[in-house]
Each structure stands twice: as structure tokens, then as C-alpha cells.
Image (cartoon, rainbow, N blue to C red):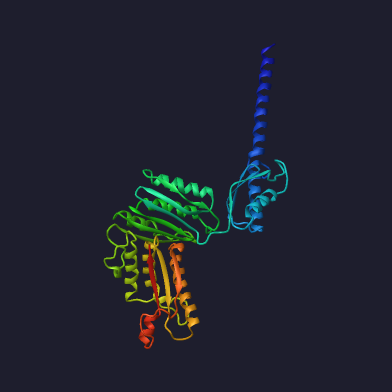
Amino acid sequence: MSDDAETVLERAGLMFRIALAAAAFFALAAVFGPHGASLWGVERDLQARIDQAFAAQSIQGVTVAMAGQRAVLSGAAAQAGGAEAAVEAALTAAGPGGLWAGGVTSVDARDLTAGPPVSPYVWSAVRQGDSVVLSGYAPDRTAKHMLRDRARAVFPRGEVTDETRVAAGAPAGPWGAVARDALGQLARLSRGEARLVDGQLVLLGDGSAEAVPAIRNHYARPLPEPFRVRLEINVTGQGIGIAELGEIDLSDANPQACQAGFGRLLQNNIINFESGSAAISPSSARLLDNLAAVALRCDRNTIEVAGHTDATGDRAVNMTLSRARADAVRAYLISQGVAANRITAQGFGPDRPRASNATRDGQAANRRIEFTVGA
């Protein structure tokens, strides 16, 4: 064979290999490229269709991720039968179809749980030395495992105990990011707790003279909606900054100290309400804020909020009013992050006077809110 013929054959072979490579490239691009008929495009389209199906059927608390044409569901379906409804909605969101036509071929619901939404929605991390205990609820297993891993990273010398459960009811917004960041701030304290109650983040505890201002500075900017932060942190040994408490030490949440703390705050102050109503007067805002500061440190104990009235008017009306006012105070404290399962409300109407109802001063003294702390 002549040199010219060999050259022609070599060129032909090279062109053939180039053509094969180009065909392979375009085939891969057809399957994986960023267009509607590619695998990537099919995943994107299917996820959008499933999201639309969930919205149309009011399926809440369920997230979807696509692995090809397989839908992977996670989270907690809020309504009765929600898990089954979510699987069916995902499977039929785009109808049947092959690789090019689309359609969900299967649904993986192993990480999907079901149940009514939890309210209030509480997650907490309690630091005990170099260890931390996670408890409460997370919206899905991804968030649960992310927070466990984050705790292990910021508490590398201690043990992480994860008692968190997956449940529906988390507020919309960056719930996981807020909780994750709070773990990092908790690690700066010597002891304490990060608690997320619905949209209220509370950081409790004490730390060094360097750590406490650094945490305050970290939270100088507002959190993204609907989240807000309340910092109940202080330099170790300096108290919680409420002058009326004097020498009372709440660092260990001793029931006697907690009872004394509530008593001291209410010794010369009362919670005012609008006349004949359970609406708390704005004039009591500072007192309520101080009461919340005590309750947050003391709610490992039981706390009873008791409402009392004077004896004027109808007894049945007074009983109802006293309970409504106690409920209003309890609701405010819960909104500030106090553990709802540790605080109760009772209404005693005029049945437990502490002064005579024969005078206006005595009647005023009998219209009151009291706190009782139990172990």
C-alpha cells in the first residue's frame, strides 16, 4: 500500500473516532444537559409538578427531591393520611411516561413520617459541661441529622445525645439555619441552652466576659422572618441584670430561689389589665419582660400562674375573668420561649382574697396575678 493510501486511511480512522466522540457527547448532552428533555430537565420538571400537586392538595410538611424519575420524600405530613396522600400525589403528578416523556416511576417515602402539626414547635440544645443534649422536634430527618452533626462539630470533646423527633409544624423560613447557628453560639457559653419555640429563639446561660458580648454582637442584626431572638445570657457570677432581684441567684433554677424571684418582682408591682378584660395593659410590658426572664431560667420546674379578682360583681364572671387573665400571662410567657408543658394557668376569682374587699385598697390588692413554683 502506498504512503498516500495509508494517509487517507489514517485520516478516515481519525475522522471516524472524532465522529464517535461527538456522537457520545451529544448523546450525553441529550440525557444530562440543561434542557427540558434531558434527565436534568426531567428532574426539574417533575419536582415542580410534584410541588404543584402538593400545593393543590394542601399537603404540608413534605419535601421532595428527585433522583432521576424516582421521587424521594422526607419530612412530616401534617394531616391525617398525609403520608399516603403525598405518595399518591407524587406518583401521579406528571402521569406515566418514559425517560423522554417524563413521569415519576417510583416514590421513596422511607424518610417520611405523618402526624398532626406540633404546637408550640420546640427544639432545644442543653449544654452540660462539654456535652449537649438535643431534644424536641425537627421538620425532617435531614435537619435532624444536620443538627446532630453540627453539635458534634462544635462540641468535639463531649457526647452528643440526640433525642430529637421528626414532626410537622415548624414555622416557614430558614428553621434549620437558625437552629444550626444557635448551636455555634451555645458552644461559646460555659453552660446554657439554645431553645427555638416556633419563631422565638432563646439563648440562656452564662459565659466569659469575652463570650457574652461576642454573642450579643453576633445577634445584633435581626434574624430572618419570622424568627426573632431573646438573649438571656450573662457573665458568670454577675447575675441576670434585674435590680429588683437583689441577691437572688437563679443560676441553678432552685425552686425556692425561683419562687423568691417571682415574689420579689411582684412585691411592689402588679400586672395591669384593661378594665373588665384579659387584655394586658402596655404599662406592664417591663414587668412582664422581667417575669419572662425569671420564668425562662426556672421552667425546668413547674410554674403555675394564678389569676385572682376582688369580690365585686358576679362570681361566675369573676371566675372566668381570673382564668382568662392567667391564660393571657401564660400565653405571653410561652411566646417568649418559656416551656409550655411546664407552665399552667388557674383562675380563682374572688375565692382567695389577701385583703378585705370592704375597701378600694383591699379590692385592688385582691386583683392580682401570682406565681407558684414546684419541683
Q: Is residue 278 above or below residue 157?
A: below
Q: Is residue 168 above or below residue 270?
A: above
Picture residue at 39% right of the left edge, 55% below the top: 193
Q: Residue furthest front?
A: 351
Between 51 and 342, which is closer to the camera in this rendering?
342
Q: Residue furthest top?
A: 1
* Image quarter hosting the N terminus: top right
Q: Please state the horizontal and vertical placement of residue 289, each as a whole percent of the image.
A: 38, 69
Picture residue at 43% right of the left edge, 75% below the top: 307
Between 81 and 16, which is closer to the camera in this rendering?
81
Horizontally, residue 204 falls left or right of residue 55, namely left
Q: Quadrant of residue 371?
A: bottom left
* Image quarter hosting the C terminus: bottom left
Between 182 and 136, which is closer to the camera in this rendering?
136
Horizontally, residue 262 falls left or right of residue 91, namely left
Q: Is residue 321 above or below residue 217?
A: below
Picture residue at 47% right of the left edge, 52% below the top: 177
Q: Residue furthest bottom?
A: 358
Q: Please state the horizontal and vertical placement of residue 254, each as a whole percent of the image.
A: 33, 61
Horizontally, residue 107 falls left or right of residue 311, namely right
Picture residue at 54% right of the left edge, 51% below the top: 140
